[in-house]
Amino acid sequence: GISKKEKLLTMKLINENGGTFTGAFQSEVTDIVVLTKEGVGSEKYKAALEYGKACVLPAWVVDSAAMGVALPLA
């Protein structure tokens, strides 16, 4: 659900700020799922809910990187 440009920026910001970006959902290592509002209902979204993982918009990553800290997930 994320455009290629947005995905590349998200990946860059996550990796530069101490996180690890993986495209595939892996319940053992995935903590946060980044998706657009259009991604609600996707298999990745359903898996995140099933395993109790947080879901955020790409803007959360951008804003967190700008602040230098992971913002609240709520």
Image (spheres, rainbow, N blue to C red):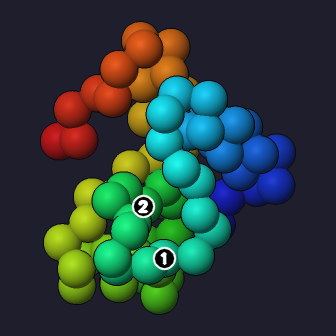
Q: In the picture shown, does residue 25 fall above or below 71?
A: below
Residue in the image at 59% along x and 63% along y: 22
Instruction: State the image coordinates of residue 24 (x, y, percent, origin top left).
Output: 58, 76
Residue 61 in sight in this render: yes
Q: Quadrant of the C terminus?
A: top left
Question: Residue reaching furthest top?
Answer: 67
Q: Position of residue 20 (x, y in %)?
A: 53, 50
Amino acid type at mark 2: Val
What residue sits 21% from the left and 32% below the top?
A: 72
Dot 1 falls on a residue whose secondary structure is loop
Question: Nearer the viewer's eye, disc 2 or disc 1?
Answer: 1
For mark 1, what is the residue?
A: 25
Q: Earlier in the sequence, mark 2 or mark 1?
A: 1
- Residue 56: horizontal and vertical position, in percent? 38, 50
Q: Residues within 10 Å of mark 2 (few under 14, many from 20)?
A: many
For disc 2, the marked residue is 33
Q: Do labels 2 and 1 touch, CB within 8 Å? A: yes
What residue is drawn where x is 22% and y is 85%? 50
**39 versus 58 height, above or below:** below
